[in-house]
Image (cartoon, helix red, strand yellow):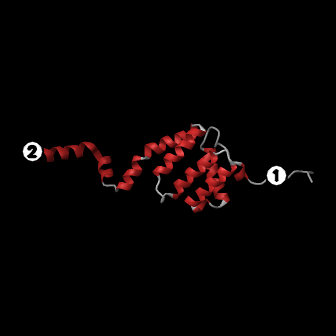
Amino acid sequence: MAVIGGELGSIHAKHERGELFASTSSLPARELKRLELVPARVMDNAAWTLGSGDVAKKLVKFELDTLDDTEGPRRARVFIRFGLVDASFDGQAAVFASACVADPSVCDTARLKKAAEQEAGARFVAPGNHLPLSLIGGHPPLEGAF
């Protein structure tokens, strides 16, 4: 009798949980972990958009801790964000180099600049809402200076 009651309870629970549970219960552990991190990544993006520079820097550690080494483009995005809020030119260079290591597709200066423009455009407050001088390029010519 207990076995029949257990089976009926299990069937009822599966029915009540719905399709979301059925589709996520069959996912591999790695995919489940990524799915669990979605709310945290949403908060990270919100903090990037409106948070202070200190908050953005603290979130870098969280993001890097949750990403695998195989997620190069995401890691590069985090490094680019950190480079945008870093006040030191040397620090920016080191962080942008780390982005290049994480995702070789951003090693080209034009692609790095484009990715940084995207991230800076998504940020509404300083620091980090504009490109650093190292990515802007050369100085415009000065008329009659020499």
Label at residue 117: none
The residue lying toward the viewer, choosing from 3 and 86, is: 86
Instruction: In the rendered structure, find residue 140 and report the number of the disc placed on it.
Output: 1
Element under disc 1: loop
> Residue 63 appears at what percent x and percent y?
50, 48
Q: Check disc 2 and report the residue beneath it.
A: 2
The picture quadrant where one finds residue 12 is: top left
44 vs 32: above or below: above
Is 128 on the left or on the right of 19, as rendered?
right
- Number of dots carrying numbers: 2
Q: Residue drawn at (62%, 49%), measured in percent from left and top? A: 83
Residue 52 vs residue 89: left or right?
A: left
Image marks 1 and 2: residues in contact by CB distance under 8 Å = no
Q: Quadrant location of the C terminus?
A: bottom right
| Residue 26, above or below 18 | below
* For marks 1 and 2 on the same chain, the one whose residue lies earlier in the sequence: 2
What amino acid is found at the position of numbered circle 1 in the picture?
Pro
Could you tell me residue 85's position as x and y percent? Answer: 63, 44
Dot 1, crowdedness within 10 Å: few (<14), some or many (≥20)? few
| Secondary structure beneath label 2 | helix
Q: CA distance from mark 1 to mark 2?
A: 83 Å
Q: Quadrant of the N terminus?
A: top left
What's the residue at 59%, 47% (across, down)? 82
| Residue at position x 30%, y 55% in the image | 26
Q: Amino acid at mark 2?
A: Ala
Residue 52 in picture, x, y percent from top left:
59, 37
Foreground residue among 87 and 16: 87
Q: Residue at x 28, y 45 (%)?
A: 18
Residue 19 point in image, percent of width and height: 30, 48
Neighbourhood count class around disc 2 (C-alpha, 10 Å): few under 14, some 14–19, many 20 upward: few
